[in-house]
Each structure stands twice: as structure tokens, then as C-alpha cells.
Image: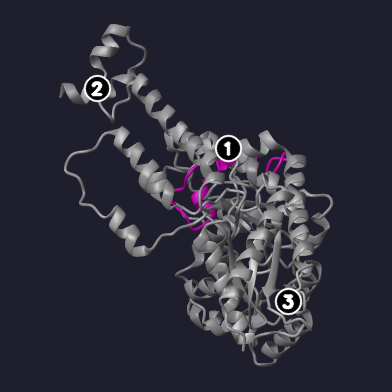
Amino acid sequence: MQAGRDKEQPLAGPQPAAAEEALEPQGEHSLNEAHLREMGYQMVDLAVEYLKGLEGRRVYGPVSPTGMDELFSEPLPEDGVSFGELVQDCRTRVFPNTMGIGGRRYFGMMNPAPLPVAVFSEMLCGAMNQNAASWRHAPSGTAIEKTVIRWLCDLFGLPADSFGTLMPGGSLANITGLKLAINRKLDRHLAQVGHDENPGAAMAKLVFYVSGQAHYSFDKAVDLLGLGRSQLRKIPVDHLFRVDLDRMSAAIEADLAAGLVPCGIIGIAGTTNTGSIDKLDRLAALARRYDCWFHVDAAYGGAVILSKMYGPMLRGIELADSITVDPHKWFYMPFAAGGILVRDGDFLRRSFLVHPEYYMEKILKDDDEQSGLPHNGHGRRVLPDERGFHHGDKVNFFQYGIQGSRRMDALKIWLAFRMVGRKQYADWVEKDIELARVLASRINRQADFRLLGPNTLGICNFRWEPRDARGGMLFSDERNDQLNRDLQERVEREGDAWFSYTVLNGRTALRVNVENRCMEQEDIERLVQVITRAAGAILASTAAP
């Protein structure tokens, strides 16, 4: 019994130094202040050591799944090991076998160099361990998330009664966007589910329309929402890899003629392959014409809204019914930090409104619940606070999305936005775009390389096609596909840089993504040297036809 009381003692208030030392449990798991500080110092040193070491190590590998499994395979220990041993394991086993994300030689997927203030805020988030699902369990966390959501809604030009919620990433946000589209089309919300006589019959007629370059999360979305894969129409793209609007209109007309129900039109603001941005204003007009929900996946390209120079590329996004954002991409947040913004914040709430008895929240009358407006206690609804949607209300974020338990992810965004400011963010985004264009110009000067794609944002796609002295291709398209894969794999194996490859118009293309506020032109020049050197080595060992 005494041990149990001792564990609770730190919560009882200050104690005399001698008594505190006598009562405080010792060991790796205690709340001893000196011990906690020492653990914290070691962790901070370890994090700084990792970040500082990124430029002096291989970007990737050599690693294999078998090797990794063997390195980390061990039985669950009966007794714990020391904290010092854990620190050393991170240094010797974990660090050497990570992808060098954040380094200036990493040009892979949309994984940024995270801002230090956001990195260290994650420790605070863990220390407070707030469940941001409900206001009662995270008062400051809820207020911070409401502020962050308001900032984002305002950035994208959404109205004052818009709202949203943070979530782990763009995939969940895209699934949520399609769920909202279904609810709007079928005029239903969560409180009505179970009362529908035959929801399956209506669901079977719904159709969504999206670019053939859209993210794979939309395939998952239609499956998770109980739709058939054929209910997601993937529309071909134009020469700049933007959705073909005429073909989309034709597909909608054909579905109407077949007795189907167009439900949602999806615009892409920055495709994963090429960074292409659909003509969002025209898609918005199309959505209005056919009474469709308009969702914009701005997980990657949404950050250009910060820039006065490039922000106009997103013209029409302010007309969206819902927008996917991913601060853990071009806002330089560490994973995970995604979210969805919704034009009608009240509709978002009604779509996910539940009242579990253990959250101890007052249940409004039916008419108030359906309206989503607060009740004044006298049988009348009141409008939201003029200072902004839900200002002054006890918002419970579990009632605004799929998630229940939620981390206080808004903290890192709030701290970073305030420390950096919009202007600095805009400068970083603009520099990344310019560096990608510098790369494109350098590649364009190489006789054996050909640019592919629009080079709209921070992505540059190109293809290696070895040529003879007269400019003719040495190898077939199929052989060149393999040579491009070989080039990527050789650079990866040597560890001098990392980029990916993809497929555009049926042909393999090398894909470079610039998304690092620390990167400079010299890093681009070095990358070109790495690529051309690897290409020369491969060609020297390849027999000509």
C-alpha cells in the first residue's frame, strides 16, 4: 500500500527536499526530476546527432527485409534494460537503417525536412498525453486545433461557417470527403443511419469522377464506403496530366442516361506523380451544374496557397465543399499531420455526430441536434459566435470525423505557424519550386535525357534515353524502361542520393521531388552529377544492340 501512495505523491504538491527524496521512487520509470532531465537531455542530444549526421551518411541502405528482421528479432525481455542501452540501440541499430529523410540528398516522396520546433513539440505532446477527442480531456488542445483549422480555412478562402478536423493523413481525409458527398446526396447523417429502409439500393447508383492520376486513397475510399470500384470513374488526363474536362462531362452525361446518380467530383491540387493541378475553377462549375459535391485533394499542392506568386494556380479551390490538406508534406511538419476542411462545418458535425454516455456531454433536442447550432436553454437556437464558427463552444472532435482517440497534433502546427509566419513559409515553397525548375533546365541540357510532365510544383520527371552520335536512340523503349529502373537502383545502392521512379504514358520515368527548406542550388547541381555519373557507368557496362 505504501508503494502505491508513494507513486501518487508527486501530485500532492511541493514537499521538503529531504522528504521528497525519501518518498520519490527511483529507477528508469520514476518521476524523479533529475532523472527525467537526464533522459530528456540524452534524447535531445540523440535527435540532434541524427539530424546533424544526415549529410554525412548514406541516404539509404544497403538494407534488406531479412537483415532488418534478424537485427531486431528478440524475445520480449522478462526484465527491462537500462535507458542508456536503449539510447545506444537507437544510435547503432535504428539510425543507420533509416531512410535519410530531411537530408539535402533526399529527393523522394513528399516527406519534408521537419521543422525543429515541430519535432520537439512532439515530446510535449507525449508528455501531456491529451486525448484530443473531447474538449473535457484536452481543453487547450481543442482550442488550439480550432485556431489551426480557422487559419487553414481562411488561407483557402472558405467562408466563416466552414470548419474541419485534423487527422493522420490525406488518405483518411479523402475517405471522409467522399463520405460527406454520399451523405449530402442521400440527405442523411449519422443519426439517421439504421432508419433507412434500403440504403444499399441508393448507394449502388452513386458515381464519383476523378483524374486518372489521382491518389490510390480514392480506390480505398470507395471500397471502405461500400461502393463498387466501378463507381469511381477515372477520367483520362491531358498532355499536362490534368483531368480532361470534356471527357469528364461526357462520362457524367453517359451515367445520367444510364439512370445513375453523379455524386462527387474530385479535383487534384498537386498529383503525386507530376504535381499537376487540375483546373479547379472549371471543376467547381461542373460540380454545380450536375449538383455534385466538389472535393479537392490538396494534400501536396495546397501549400502553394501561402505564396502570392504561385497561389493563383489554385484558383477555384475556395469553391470546394471539402479540401484535403497535409501539413506533414509542404508545411514541413513531422508525421502525422493531415486534415480536412469543410465549407459547411455544421454538416461535418452532423455527419459524424454520436453521443456516447461516458463522455458526459449534454444531448441537445432533436431539432438542435439536426441543425448543429447551440441551444440557449430556453427552447431557441442561437447563431454561432460572430468571431468565428464554434467560437466559445465546447467542440468535441470525435464528433467531426472517423477517429475516436486523437493525439494533440495541432500543437506542432500551431507552434510552427506562429514561429515561422506565412511569409517565410511562402519563401520556402517558392524556393523549392524554383530549384525543381533549375533541375529541369539542367536535365534539358543533357542529350541523353528527356523531360516528362509539366514541372508545375516541386516535382521534376525525366527519362534517360541513351543516344548515338547522330541523336538516334540506342535501345528500344522497353529496354530504356529497364535502364531507368537500373539507374535509380544504382544511385540508391551507392547511397549518394535518393529519388524514385514512376510510370508516365506507359513509360518509366525518374521522379525527383524537391521539398526541403534547407536545400540550395548546389544540391541540385550535385544531384545532376550523381545521375549522369551513374548513367555513364551503366552504359559502359551495357552492350549496344
- Pointer 2 local density, CA inside 10 Å: few below 14, some 14–19, many at least 20: some
- Secondary structure of the residue carrying tag 2 is loop
Q: Start and end of the magenta stretch? A: 383-412
- Mark 3 or mark 2, which is nearer the start of the sequence? 2
Question: Is 396 part of what is drawn in magenta?
Answer: yes
Q: Nearer the viewer, residue 260 or 466?
A: 466
Check residue 414 in the rendering and tell me which mark sits there, or answer none: none
Displayed quadrant of residue 349: bottom right
- Residue shown at 26%/34% (left/top)? 82
Question: What amino acid type is highlighted by mark number 2?
Answer: Pro
Name, please, the residue furthest toward the bottom.
Answer: 258
217 or 441, which lies in front? 441
Q: Is residue 323 left or right of residue 359?
A: right
Label 1 crowding class (10 Å Cα cut-off): few <14, some 14-19, many 20+? some
Q: Which of the two labelled residues, at mark 2 and mark 1, occupies the earlier sequence position?
A: 2
Q: CA distance from mark 1 to mark 3?
A: 37 Å
Residue 469 located within the stretch drawn in magenta: no
- Visible residue check, residue 500: yes
Amino acid beneath label 1: Pro
Give the SS element for disc 1.
helix
Question: Which residue, given by chain and number where applicable, does mark 2 sit on?
Answer: 25
Residue 333 lies, in percent from the top left, at 59, 46
**Are dots 2 and 3 in contact, CB under 8 Å?**
no
- Residue 311 is drawn in which quadrant? bottom right
Task: Report the quarter where the C terminus lies.
Answer: bottom right
Q: Earlier in the sequence, mark 1 or mark 3?
A: 1
Compared to residue 177, the image places residue 222 above or below, namely below
> Seen in the image, is 415 located left or right of residue 53?
right
Query: Does the residue at mark 2 contact the one at mark 1 (Cβ under 8 Å)?
Result: no
| Residue receiving disc 3 | 243
Could you tell me how far apart the alpha carbons at marks 2 and 3 are, in whole angstroms?
63 Å
Question: Any mark on residue 116, and which?
Answer: 1
